[in-house]
Image (cartoon, rainbow, N blue to C red):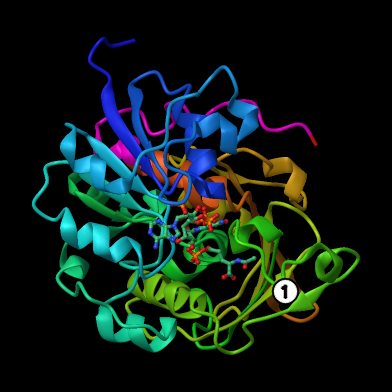
Amino acid sequence: MSNTRKKVAIVGASGYTGSELARFLLHHPEVEIEMITSETHKGKTFSTLHPQFTGQLDMPLVSAQKVADEPMDVVFLALPHGVSMNFVKQWSDKSFKIVDLSGDFRLKNAEVYEHWYKKDHNYQEGFANAVYGLPELHKEEIRKSDLIANPGCYPTASTLGLAPLVNEKLIDIQGIIIDAKSGITGAGIKPSLTTHFSNVNDNFRAYGVKSHRHTIEIEEQLGFLNEGEVKVQFTPHLLPLDRGILATSYSTPLKDMTQKKLDELYQSFYRQKPFVRVRESLPTLKDVRGSNYCDVYPIWDERTNRIMVFSAIDNLVKGAAGQAIQNMNIMLGFEETLGLLQNPLKP
Ligand SMILES: NC(=O)C1=CN([C@@H]2O[C@H](COP(=O)(O)OP(=O)(O)OC[C@H]3O[C@@H](n4cnc5c(N)ncnc54)[C@H](OP(=O)(O)O)[C@@H]3O)[C@@H](O)[C@H]2O)C=CC1
Ligand SMILES: CC(=O)N[C@@H](CCC(=O)OP(=O)(O)O)C(=O)O
């Protein structure tokens, strides 16, 4: 362990991803949580809001405006879309690195953002500096970056499931279907009618049909790999569970396919990628619960000549906080897996 630990701040720590960031960073051997912010709860301790941290992380919550007063190495923004951009803009001349968990800088430019997010963007310049933080595809750019646009949860599961096929130009990129299901923590801590217990419990529904903002995020990332225009029919569903995403994608091969070819392709593509596990059985949400793994399992159906890929992640970990720390590790020159190989949560 080094005695010059890097100083990090978690901004927006009263939410779900803020709490997950703390869960991992608290045990990270090379960093110190220097500051945790909350506007609504400043003055209280972090463990008052998240009692599971009692005796472990009892530091007081302060306003985000205090972050720039202290020397920091990395600042995590666990804030809603439309809020993060203000801080990225305000801190653009600071020396610390930023990992933004929101969608404010994930897309190509402000125009595309405004179309899909239905809100104005006030810091277009940020797009030029931001690197899309999916380490399995962009590790070298992440290493040199000062601003990471941490991917969305559904795009992480979906893109990792399809990347080997799209990269090798093996499937029809205009006819991809992704059917994805998420636990409710994906919707954040603020209650709403849709996430109300009695509307979620013993219930199941699709939402965001034809219009979910993750459609474009997946299309842009797969398009980058294929250098072509990707069209995805993406439909998310809300599961009556707290956490986890299972994305099932369907695509049509352009060349002769066999299960053996598919297995070899996935094994080879993910050989040096410690957080993607190519499975030989269908992944379940409990297999990845609490961990930073993305489990993928590709199957070719010779009867229909379709490829199905099943990918499972924990939306709060590989889909948010864990991936953010994986990005931090890469930016700071640490081992990619540092602090992230805790035991998975018990089912
Ligand atoms: N939940 C998930 O599975 C995933 C989430 N993300 C993204 O990560 C980000 C955080 O998500 P999540 O933790 O779920 O969100 P939450 O809604 O759980 O928490 C967001 C926090 O942001 C703070 N906040 C809200 N409004 C403001 C504001 N105007 N100014 C400053 N702070 C504000 C609040 O803290 P306080 O009031 O205490 O300051 C709140 O607790 C979001 O952009 C989300 O889209 C990405 C991938 C997956
Ligand atoms: C279940 C649920 O509501 N999930 C969220 C996605 C969460 C996520 O990935 O966050 P970003 O908004 O940062 O992209 C949704 O569909 O809006």
- Work out whether 326 lies above or below 253: above
Density class for disc 1 (Cα within 10 Å; few <14, some 14-19, many ≥20) is few
Q: Tell me which amino acid carries mark 1.
A: Leu
Q: Is residue 278 or residue 286 the one in the foreground?
A: 286
Q: In which quarter of the image is the N terminus?
A: top left
Looking at the rendering, the stretch of residues picked out in magenta corresponds to 328-346
- Work out whether 305 lies above or below 309: below
Q: Is residue 172 or residue 150 the one in the foreground?
A: 150
Q: Judge left or right: residue 128 versus residue 67.
A: left
Residue at (48, 21) in percent of width and height = 27
x, y percent for residue 79: 42, 57
Q: Main secondary structure of the magenta part?
A: loop
**In the rendered image, is residue 297 in sight?**
no
**In the rendered image, is residue 51 in sight?**
yes
Residue 61 figure quarter: top left
x, y percent for residue 124: 19, 75
Counting labels gives 1
x, y percent for residue 272: 43, 40
- Work out whether 191 lies above or below 234: above
Residue at (68, 80) in percent of width and height = 207
Q: Is 317 covered by the magenta stretch?
A: no
Q: Is 345 covered by the magenta stretch?
A: yes
x, y percent for residue 309: 66, 64
Residue at (57, 17) in percent of width and height = 55
What residue is pinned by disc 1? 193
Q: In which quarter of the image is the C terminus?
A: top right
